[in-house]
Image (cartoon, rainbow, N blue to C red):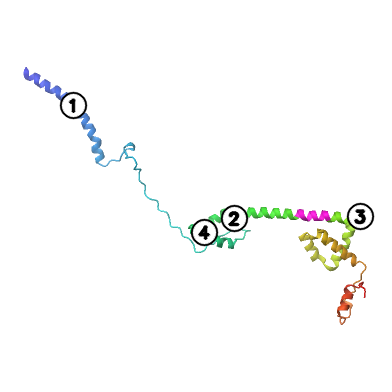
Amino acid sequence: MPEAEENKGATAAETQASPAESVASATEKPAESTAQGEEQTLLGKEEGKPEEKPAEVKPEVVVPEKYDLKVPEGMTLDQAMLDKISPVFKELKISQEGAQRLADVYAPYIKEMVEQSRTTAVGEFNKMVGDWKAETTKELSKDGAKSEQELAHAAKFIDKFGGPELRQVLNETGLGNHIALVKAFIKAGKAIANDSFPDSTKRDVKDDSEEAKAKRMFPSMPK
């Protein structure tokens, strides 16, 4: 009987020791797994040591000796500006492709600025010529005079000594509306109204003296 009690006590001791051994065994397994090279968990990484990534290899930039840029149709490349800015491009190590991309972005902006400037200039020019015309018409109509009759004298002078070429210049420049020029042509037209200009093709070719030339040009001039 005593022997049976002793064996029973040993069995109970073994039973009580089993949970502790189980915990110890469970605790030791992750260490063995980690030692075998398994990856660390997200919370198991050491602080201050982020995951390393392979370094990115950037392609080498080729800087041209001279930049050759293209501009949109209808525009002209400002070579002087390109010559000044090329050293800056090279210093910044901008490739030919990079410089062309900059030009492609910048060109429409420049084109828009030029068009706006041209439109503004044309508008200002037309306004100036219109103001000249209004001023001249008002000046020629003073004292009951009719501007159409006054301008007829100028037209005769232009027809005789200027022709279509002179009229084109007066119209393109707008000077045909300027009061000073209009008055000058009116006076010139009135001055030749009663003068006779002999046909130069019928004159004596031997009479080429300065006095004869002046008389032919200004027949009403006193002797």
The magenta stretch spans which residues? 126-135
Inspect the image, locate mark 4, and give the three-letter code of the amino acid beneath it. Answer: Val
Q: CA distance from mark 4 to mark 3?
A: 68 Å
- For label 2, the crowd category at 10 Å Cα-Cα, with few meaning under 14, some 14 to 19 and many 20 or more, is some
Q: Residue at x 89, y 55 (%)?
A: 142
Tag count: 4
Disc 2 target residue: 107
- Crowding at dot 3, Cα within 10 Å, few <14 / some 14-19 / many 20+, comes out as few
Quadrant of the rendered image containing residue 73: bottom right
> Label 1: which residue?
18
In the picture shown, does residue 8 fall above or below 142? above
Does label 2 or label 1 sit earlier along the sequence?
1
**Mark 4, residue position:** 88
**Quadrant location of the C terminus in the rendered image:** bottom right
Nearer mark to the viewer, of 4 and 1: 4
Task: Categorize mark 4 by other alpha carbons within 10 Å: few (<14), some (14-19), many (20+).
Answer: few
The quadrant the N terminus occupies is top left
Q: Earlier in the sequence, mark 4 or mark 3?
A: 4
- Determine the main secondary structure of the stretch shown in magenta: helix
Who comes first in sequence, dot 3 or dot 1? 1
For residue 98, above or below residue 217: above
Looking at the rendered structure, the kind of residue marked 2 is Ala
Which amino acid, by three-letter code, is at mark 3? Asp
Task: Tell me the amino acid under the disc marked 1.
Answer: Ser
Q: Can you tell which mark lies on residue 143?
A: 3
Q: How far across and down, in percent of the image, does residue 10 sit?
A: 12, 23
In the image, taking residue 48 as reference, residue 220 lies left or right, namely: right
